[in-house]
Amino acid sequence: MAAAASPSSAPQAPWLPWMRRALQLAALGEGRTSPNPLVGGVVLDAAGQLVGEGFHARAGESHAEVGALAQAGARARGGTLIVTLEPCCHHGRTPPCSEAVIAAGISRVVVAMADPDPRVAGGGIARLRAAGLEVIEAVAEAEALRLNRAFVHRVCSGRPLGILKWAMSLDGRTALPNGQSQWISGPEARAWVHQLRAGCDAVIVGGGTLRTDDPLLTSRGRRHPEPLRVVISRSLDLPEAAQLWDQALAPTLVAHGPIGAPEQRVYTARAEATCALLDRLGVERLALAPCEPARLLETLAARGCNRVLWECGPELAAAALRQGCVQELAAVIAPKLLGGLAARTPLGDLGLEGLDQVQPWRDLERRDLGSDLLWELESPEPPADHAELTPMGAGFARPGSAP
Ligand SMILES: NC(=O)c1ccc[n+]([C@@H]2O[C@H](COP(=O)([O-])OP(=O)(O)OC[C@H]3O[C@@H](n4cnc5c(N)ncnc54)[C@H](OP(=O)(O)O)[C@@H]3O)[C@@H](O)[C@H]2O)c1
């Protein structure tokens, strides 16, 4: 038995194809595992033959390693486990996976990335090494971090990862000067948005979009349960009839400021009436102080949301950006000209005073959706959480983490 808990110097390249298979398996859980990460794993027997595959399908269900080991059965003895995330070492809703790996008689574990969850943070790998297993780390680490960026962001920042999406014309308008906006994009783009919602835990709009568009905000059945639909409203001057109030379709949360707050002065009676209506319809309410995007996200993270979609208008979108609530953009650009100086654009004021303050967002992907163009980008700011992650060989540079 090896006693030392040192990083392995074994070559990583031979494990890459198996790790890519494990990453494919992990991705099958997309949109269903929050607050947990996406995890996939494969088991090879002592002769290197594939004998087990598994992935984490849903929060509360078995972890990827356990599924792959169960499929392998006794053939796992003396074999190799290739897994996209460090096996856990704590008792959560399921027992620690590191113990299951040891009990199955696995002799080598190949891991893509360490688990940033402070309850694990290197402890799972240390436990495996202490039991004499060889551990090879950081195989396809960048791909694994990319796949689990929402989970990592939530664990490290205390907020879900935010995607801001809008549809606009070629000349940057999101509505005609008279306010008409449905539909700027084509059917393929709208179907893609349903898919995007299915990968998110919550979809957020402001009171303005609710009043103007009466949106449905569901994935049209692509995800079960549907993502939480969230409205932020300071005034609570919201319509009596709205598709979002239909709780049989999907749950809705209305986040608002304290009743009687200055922004409701004109509307206090209206705000009280809205509260009574929402309570009668069984629509959940959440009082925030202050009623701001950042505060909302902290609450959603505590409820286990890893990824949220901002589908709001310019006012709330600008506030979300200013408060660091947006890490990715998805712009659908239609080959149409709407014109009009008074026409809406995707963003309100960002408080910028010089172009030297403006950094380009990083290209993620550009592709066609029917006749529209989808351009996905990520923030120019390196996420604070990722900066804390060092290559796995060196472990996590976070206070209190296991070596
Ligand atoms: N093309 C697209 O992709 C797209 C997407 C969404 C919306 N839109 C269009 O955008 C227009 C609506 O624009 P909008 O700017 O009024 O919508 P919005 O940004 O969705 O809503 C703004 C509202 O959000 C609430 N809010 C709560 N906290 C806030 C904060 N800290 N900062 C800012 N707002 C906060 C306020 O609601 P209360 O007033 O209730 O207090 C505010 O009036 C519509 O014409 C809609 O069609 C276009």
Image: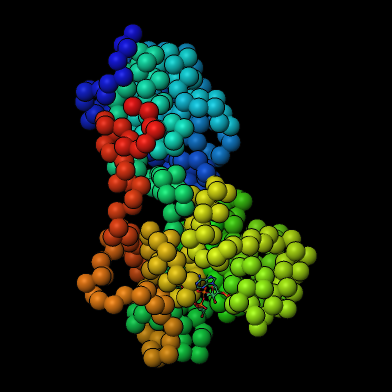
Residue 291 seen in the figure: yes
| As drawn, 344 above or below 392 | below
Point out residue 377 in the picture as x, y percentages from the top left corner: 33, 61
Point out residue 60 in the picture as x, y percentages from the top left corner: 58, 36
Q: Residue at x 69, y 77 (%)?
A: 268
> How many tags in the picture?
0
Task: Find residue 251 and report its image quarter.
Answer: bottom right
Task: Find residue 336 and report its image quarter.
Answer: bottom left
Point out residue 309 in the picture as x, y percentages from the top left corner: 48, 61
Residue 44 seen in the figure: no
Q: Residue at x 59, y 77 (%)?
A: 263
User: What quarter of the picture does the N terminus occupy?
Assistant: top left
User: What quarter of the picture does the C terminus occupy?
Assistant: top left
Q: Nearer the viewer, residue 309 or 194?
A: 309
| As drawn, 268 above or below 179 | above
Left or right of residue 216: residue 114: left
- State the residue lying farthest toward the top: 1
Q: Residue at x 59, y 71 (%)?
A: 233
Point out residue 335 in the picture as x, y percentages from the top left corner: 35, 78
| As drawn, 399 above or below 334 | above
Colour scheme in the image? Answer: rainbow
| As drawn, 207 above or below 67 | below
Task: Find residue 7 and report its image quarter.
Answer: top left
Q: Residue at x 39, y 19 (%)?
A: 128
Left or right of residue 64: residue 78: left
Q: Nearer the viewer, residue 198 or 145?
A: 145
